[in-house]
Amino acid sequence: MTAKRNRRKNTVPFDERLYKAAYEARQAAQQLPQGAEREALLKKARQAETAAHLNQWLSTQACSRRAPASSRRDRRAVRSVR
C-alpha cells in the first residue's frame, strides 16, 4: 500500500516565508558567539534572502513576458541569413 501524501495549502506567500526564515536565522545567529554554528546560520539567512530576491525577480511581469514562438523562430532565421 502506498502512503498518502499530506497536502496542505500554504496561506503565507513563498517570499514572506523566505524572509521570515532569514530573519529568524539572523536573530538566532545574534545570540551565538563567533563560530561555525553562527556562520552556518548567517549563511542560511543569506541563502533565504537570495532565494526570495530570485523568486521576486522571476515572478515580475518583465521576466514572464516572452516573445511568441513564431517571432523567436523569425529571429533565428534572420541570424542565420546574416
Image (cartoon, rainbow, N blue to C red):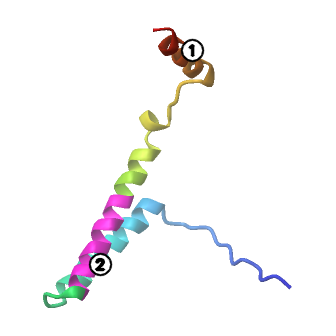
> Which quadrant: the C terminus?
top left
Mostly what secondary structure, the magenta segment?
helix
Q: How many marks?
A: 2
Q: Residue at x 40, y 63 (%)?
A: 16
Q: Residue at x 48, y 61 (%)?
A: 13
Which mark sits nearer the N-terminus, 1 or 2? Answer: 2
- Give the answer, above or below, for where 56 lies relative to 68: below
Q: Nearer the viewer, residue 31 or 3?
A: 3
Q: Place residue 42 in its image quadrant.
A: bottom left
Q: CA distance from mark 1 to mark 2?
A: 49 Å
Marks 1, 2: nearer the viewer: 1
Dots 1 and 2: beta carbons under 8 Å?
no
Q: Dot 2 corresponds to which residue?
A: 25
* Magenta stretch: includes residue 43: yes
Q: Dot 2, how many residues are within 10 Å of its Cα: few (below 14), some (14-19), or many (20+)? A: many
Q: Which mark is residue 74?
A: 1
Farthest right residue in view: 1
Percent position (x, y) of residue 4?
77, 80
- Give the answer, above or below, for where 21 lies relative to 65: below
Percent position (x, y) of residue 18?
39, 66
| Segment colored magenta | 37-51
* Label 2 secondary element: helix
Q: Nearer the viewer, residue 4 or 69?
A: 69
